[in-house]
């Protein structure tokens, strides 16, 4: 079995597409049309974004936008501090500026426009 993607439900698809495009430094793909769904394809997986209307129409209204408080999306990078500089003021909801954790990872935490928590980190091997 292979994890294919992480899908986030939103009421503001353009804002989340722009946000994750900046975070992942990738261009969005809209394989099913631009109205309800977009994908950001990274080296190791896909961040999929869908509107609440799309969830209602295609998935029995099974998920609610901006209601997550239990999942953290994690992205591994070579240099957390360089990513902090690159992202600059695009991030408006910082939870933790870059810090070295006791186990050696350097990480930073922030929230996307819908409140989903994001951890960008580098492991000691890539620092």
Image: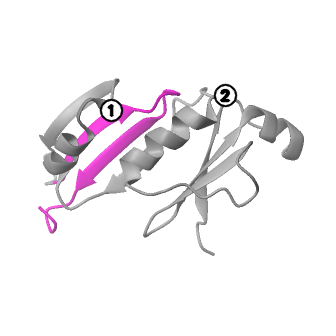
Q: Are the two marked residues, 2 and 1, in contact with CB atoms closer than 8 angstroms? A: no
For disc 2, the marked residue is 11
Residue at coordinates 20% horizontally, 41% vertically from top-left?
A: 84
Q: Is residue 35 left or right of residue 48?
A: right
Q: Nearer the viewer, residue 23 or 99?
A: 23
Q: Percent position (x, y) of residue 119? A: 34, 44
Q: Position of residue 86 (x, y in %)?
A: 22, 45
* Mark earlier in primary sequence (2, 1): 2
Relative side of 24 to 71, left or right: left
Figure check: 91 above or below 26: above
The answer to which of 113 and 116 lies nearer the viewer is 113
Quarter-of-image position of residue 52: top right
Mark 1 neighbour class, 10 Å CA radius: few under 14, some 14 to 19, many 20 or more: few
In three-dimensional space, the C-alpha distance between marks 2 and 1, rounded to whole angstroms, equals: 19 Å
Quarter placement of the C terminus: bottom left
- On screen, residue 46 above or below 55: below
- 2 vs 1, front mark: 1
Q: Residue furthest bottom?
A: 1
Quadrant in which residue 57 is drawn: top right
| Residue range (magenta) | 105-127
The dot on residue 4 is: none
Q: Report the front residue among 70 and 90.
A: 90
Residue at image position (51%, 65%) is 45
Check the picture and name the quadrant holding the N terminus: bottom right
Label drawn at residue 90: 1
Q: Is residue 110 left or right of residue 53?
A: left
Q: Around disc 2, counting alpha carbons within 10 Å, would you say few (fewer than 14), some (14 to 19), or many (20 or more)?
A: some
Q: Secondary structure at mark 1?
A: helix
* Magenta span includes 114: yes
């Amino acid at each position: 079995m292979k994890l294919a993607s992480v899908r986030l439900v939103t009421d503001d698809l353009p804002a989340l597409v722009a946000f994750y495009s900046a975070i992942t430094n990738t261009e969005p793909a809209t394989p099913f049309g631009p109205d309800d769904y977009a994908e950001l394809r990274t080296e190791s997986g896909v961040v999929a974004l869908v509107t609440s209307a799309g969830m209602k129409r295609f998935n029995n209204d099974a998920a609610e936008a901006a209601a997550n408080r239990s999942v953290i999306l994690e992205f591994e990078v070579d240099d957390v501090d360089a990513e902090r500089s690159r992202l600059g003021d695009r991030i408006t909801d910082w939870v933790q500026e870059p810090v070295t954790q006791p186990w050696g990872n350097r990480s930073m935490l922030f929230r996307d426009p819908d409140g989903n928590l994001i951890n960008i980190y580098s492991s000691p091997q890539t620092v």
